[in-house]
Amino acid sequence: MTLANRLLLISDLHLTPERPDVFQAFGAFIRSQTNPDTALYILGDFFNLWIGDDGMDDFAREAAAILSAAAEQGMAIHIMHGNRDFLMGREFADACHATLIDDPCIVDTNGQSYLLMHGDTLCTRDKDYMAFRQMVRNPEWQQAFLDKPLLERQSFANQARAQSKTMSSNKPEDIMDVSPEAVSGILEQYDQMTLIHGHTHRPLVHDLDLKNGKGKRIVLGDWDVSGWYVEISAGKSSLNSFPIQA
């Protein structure tokens, strides 16, 4: 996939009405960065929770309007599913004037290529989560879930989040981080040297020793106290942050 000369990548905004400061920071960031020569990649967990496009409310429509306005000015918008918004569908993407992209996805710009992921599939040591993910990513499970009433879906999602939070608090930190073997394996599988992902909320640039040479793993942070983004321009990548004003 050949893209604009400048790429911006964000993830884990976890947009929710309970965090108007994050929503305002998101809107200001998009408006300040909108440019026809820029492509925006949202690498999952754009929303804190998504139970189906038929549950789209005024808050979600306002978020879509911000992205749609940027798209109308020429910015290409790409959205990847995360572990909290994997039920996001084409109805919402169309409202954003955005394209849904696969996980993983390879992008090319200025002679460089990058492997983009949300990052949850790299946490292979978290056996409980991987089993849950396999269940909810099954198309038959998803269709059965989407056939349920909105209130029932909301209740299930709230219970799942509460259970996940409780289980996570009892797990060692390294269990919920990516495994080195998964990182090197996916880069070798796709013949790439640079991986960019979110999910773990541990923003950092890691240098890697791969079979084909020196590689790099760039981890995006979640939007909480700070907003995080990766900028790729002129063949160079940088991990950046800015304060979110409460």
Image (spheres, rainbow, N blue to C red):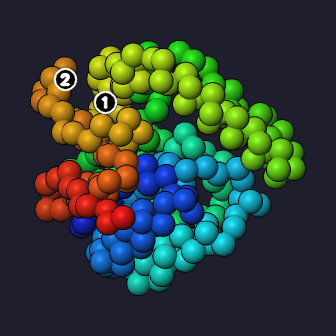
Q: What element carries label 2?
A: strand
Number of the label disc, if any, that sits on residue 172: none
The residue tagged 1 is 187
Instruction: In the rendered view, tell whether residue 2 sits above or below residue 62.
Output: above
Dots 1 and 2: beta carbons under 8 Å?
yes
- For the C terminus, the image quarter is bottom left
Relative horizontal placement of residue 55, taking residue 105 as reference (left or right): right
Relative horizontal placement of residue 17, taking residue 58 as reference (left or right): left
The residue tagged 2 is 210
Disc 2 residue type (three-letter): Leu
Residue at image location 15% in from the left, 56% down from the top? 235
Q: Is residue 232 visible?
A: yes
Residue 32: x %, y % from top left: 30, 77
Q: Quadrant of residue 63?
A: bottom right
Q: Is mark 1 on a helix, strand or loop?
A: helix
Residue 62: x %, y % from top left: 57, 74
User: Separation of disc 1 and disc 2 at Cα?
Assistant: 8 Å
